[in-house]
Amino acid sequence: MKIGVLTSGGDAPGMNAAIRAVTRAALNSGDKVVGIYDGYRGLVYAKFKDFRRTDVSEILNKGGTILGTARLPEFLYESVRKIAILKMELDGIDALVCIGGDGTYRGALDLSNMGVKVVTIPGTIDNDIASSDYTIGFSTALNTACDAIDKLRDTSSSHQRCSIIEVMGRHCGDLALFSGICCGAEYIITNETGLDKENLLESLKKNRLEGRRHAIVVISENITDVHELAKEVEKYSGYECRATILGYVQRGGAPSPEDRLLASRLGKYAVDLLHEGVYGVACGVVGNELKATPLAEALKQQRKSQLELNNLAKKIS
Ligand code: F6P
C-alpha cells in the first residue's frame, strides 16, 4: 500500500512520535509512505513527500509536528474534498492516517463517506476524543500546566493572593480537572461543574477568614473572562487576586513518555488496521486495550463526566 500520513488541527506533543510509528510500521511491512504537509490543506495542494525511514529519525522526542498543521474550514465543502481525493489518486495514495482532534475526525469521516480509506489517531491536548481514554498530547500538556500552577502557587503564597489560572481544553474539562487535582487547587471550574460565582466567592471568602495564605482556582477556557472574574474575587473575598491564562505554552514541549508510548502504540495500530482492511475508524486505547471505533460513532461519543474526579477534587481541597 501507499499510505499518506498527516497532522491537522491544533498541534500536540507526541504527534511526531505518531508520524514516526506510522512511517516505520508501514515501511517495515513493505508499504510506501507519503508525508502530507500542513494537514488537509497539503492534501488539496499536493504537498507530498515520499518518506524513507530517515525522514522520521530523531523526532520521537520532539514537540510540534514535522509535517506542520493547519485548520481548513473549506474542507467542509465536497468540492474541496474532491480535489483532495484527485490529488491522492494522482500520487497513487491508497489510504490515509489522519492525526488530530475533533475537526480532523470530521474531515476524515467526510472523506471516508466519499470512499477514501482512512483511519484516525487522536492527537490533541484537549483529551476530548471519547473513543480513546487519553489523546496524544494530553499527558504533556498536563505536566506543563502542573509545572506552571506549582510556580503560581509559590508566588501566590508569598503575596497572600488568590490565583485564577485558565487552562486549555476547548470544551473539555479534563486539563483543568486533572491539573487542579494534581496541584491541590482550592476550586476547579469546568464545563461539567459550571461556574457558580456565588459559591466561588463565598468559598474563597471562607478560606480567607480561616487564615489560608493563598487560593488556587483552575478554570477551563471558554467559560468566562478570567480577568473580570479576578476583579470580582478581589472585591468580595478579601484576597488580592491575579488571573493567568496559560495559553499556547500548553501545546509545546517535548512529549512525555506516556505520550510517546501512546503515539507509538496507536501509530502501529493504525497501520495494522489498514492491512486488515479496516477503514473509517478511529484508533484509541480503552482500558489499556487498543480499540477501533467507527468514525461516526467516535464523533458522537461524549467524554463521560469525570464524576469520581469531580467529587475527589471537592473532598480533598
Ligand atoms: O484543540 C487544541 C486547542 O489548543 C484548544 O485547546 C484551543 O481552544 C484551540 O486549540 C486553539 O486553537 P488555535 O490554535 O486555532 O488558536
Image (spheres, grey):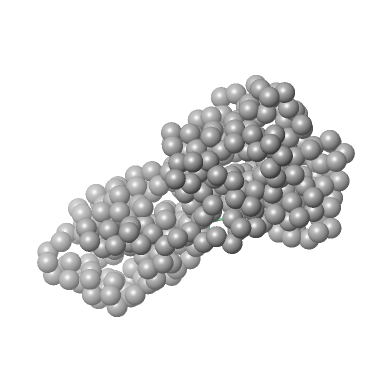
Please state if 52 lies on the left or on the right of 90 as rendered: left
**Residue farthest left in this picture:** 210
Q: Is residue 229 visible?
A: yes
**Residue farthest front in this picture:** 276
- Name the foreground residue: 307 vs 53: 307
Q: Residue at x 40, y 47 (%)?
A: 142
- Name the foreground residue: 7 vs 238: 7
Please state if 112 lies on the left or on the right of 87 as rendered: left
Q: Position of residue 292 (x, y in %)?
A: 59, 46
Q: Quadrant of the C terminus?
A: bottom left
Please state if 171 lies on the left or on the right of 21 as rendered: left
Question: Where in the image, quadrant-wise, is ligand 1 located?
Answer: bottom right
- Name the foreground residue: 217 vs 34: 34
Please tell me whether residue 95 is drawn above or below residue 163 in the rendered image.
above
Q: Quadrant of the N terminus?
A: top right
Q: Position of residue 303 (x, y in %)?
A: 48, 59
Q: Quadrant of residue 31?
A: top right
Q: Position of residue 86 (x, y in %)?
A: 86, 46
Q: Quadrant of residue 225?
A: bottom left
Q: Residue at x 68, y 24 (%)?
A: 29
Q: Residue at x 67, y 44 (%)?
A: 119
Q: Quadrant of residue 67?
A: top right
Q: Position of residue 41 (x, y in %)?
A: 74, 48
Q: Is residue 72 visible?
A: no
Q: How many marks?
A: 0
Q: Residue at x 34, y 75 (%)?
A: 196
